[in-house]
């Protein structure tokens, strides 16, 4: 996730990390050339974040679906979005498509992790591609359990 995300750092003034969880991935985004804020909605992960990383890093204990698409610290607009949000199967719904679409239209790039290896398997991606957005699978980590793929989403 980090390796692919860093290719986009030069294009943005800030980043936002969605679905921080235990911080296993997020920890790599804490000392980057562009500042990241971290979003996590589950209270147990929020507590764990403070225990591991202290108060210095900006953690937003919020639901992704309530984030505005603007250029504020918690905004999805005109920034690099690194997302571990679950987006497949029962986690898919219209509001997800709407948030991703609005963010991409604002000029943001999204680096999204998924346990589904193929673009066609992900209904969200199918919808976005039909609307003309570009989605590329950049990498698959076969030795992750389960194997995980990293996709980059952007406006043409
Ligand atoms: C696949 S896990 C991420 C794992 C993470 N990379 C880690 O290192 O632990 C998905 C994370 O997204 C969070 N999440 C799910 N829905 C969310 C939402 N609507 N808003 C914010 N966070 C959400 C979950 O609580 C969970 O921590």
Image (cartoon, rainbow, N blue to C red):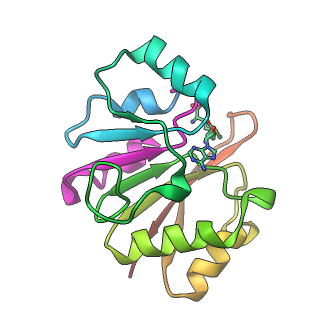
Q: Residue furthest top?
A: 51
Asked if the stretch drawn in magenta spans residue 22, the answer is yes
Q: Residue placed at 50% from the left, 32% from the top?
A: 25
Q: Residue furthest right?
A: 90
**Quadrant holding ligand 1?**
top right
Q: Is residue 41 above or below residue 115?
A: above
State whether residue 22 appears in this view: no
Q: Position of residue 127 (x, y in %)?
A: 64, 80
Q: Is residue 42 above or below residue 74?
A: above
Horizontal arrangement in the rendering, residue 44 relative to residue 39 (left or right): right
Q: Position of residue 34 (x, y in %)?
A: 21, 43
Horizontal arrangement in the rendering, residue 131 relative to residue 108 (left or right): right
| Quadrant in the rendering for residue 146 | top right
Q: Residue placed at 67% from the left, 57% from the top?
A: 87
State whether residue 107 appears in this view: yes
Q: Is residue 103 above or below residue 37?
A: below
| Quadrant in the rendering for residue 11 | bottom left
Q: Residue placed at 43% from the left, 44% from the top?
A: 17
7 or 17: which is nearer to us?
17
Task: Please give the range of residues in magenta.
Answer: 1-23
92 or 116: which is nearer to us?
92
Q: Position of residue 105 (x, y in %)?
A: 38, 78
Q: Position of residue 29 (x, y in %)?
A: 36, 34
Horizontal arrangement in the rendering, residue 17 relative to residue 21 (left or right): left
| Quadrant in the rendering for residue 92 | bottom right
Q: Residue placed at 70% from the left, 56% from the top?
A: 117
Query: Number of labelled discs?
Result: 0
Asked if the stretch drawn in magenta spans residue 53, the answer is no
Q: Is residue 33 above or below residue 43?
A: below
């Amino acid at each position: 996730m980090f390796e692919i995300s860093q290719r986009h750092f030069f294009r943005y003034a800030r980043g936002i990390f969605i679905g921080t969880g235990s911080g296993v991935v997020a920890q790599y985004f804490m000392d980057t050339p562009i500042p990241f804020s971290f979003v996590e909605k589950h209270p147990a992960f929020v507590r764990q974040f403070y225990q591991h990383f202290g108060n210095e890093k900006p953690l937003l204990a919020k639901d992704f679906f309530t984030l505005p698409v603007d250029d504020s610290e918690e905004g999805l607009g005109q920034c690099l979005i690194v997302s571990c949000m679950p987006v497949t199967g029962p986690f898919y719904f219209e509001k997800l498509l709407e948030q991703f679409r609005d963010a991409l239209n604002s000029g943001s790039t999204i680096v999204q992790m998924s346990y589904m290896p193929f673009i066609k398997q992900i209904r969200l991606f199918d919808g976005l591609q039909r609307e003309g957005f570009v989605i590329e699978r950049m990498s698959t980590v076969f030795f992750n359990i389960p194997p995980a793929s990293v996709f980059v989403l952007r406006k043409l």
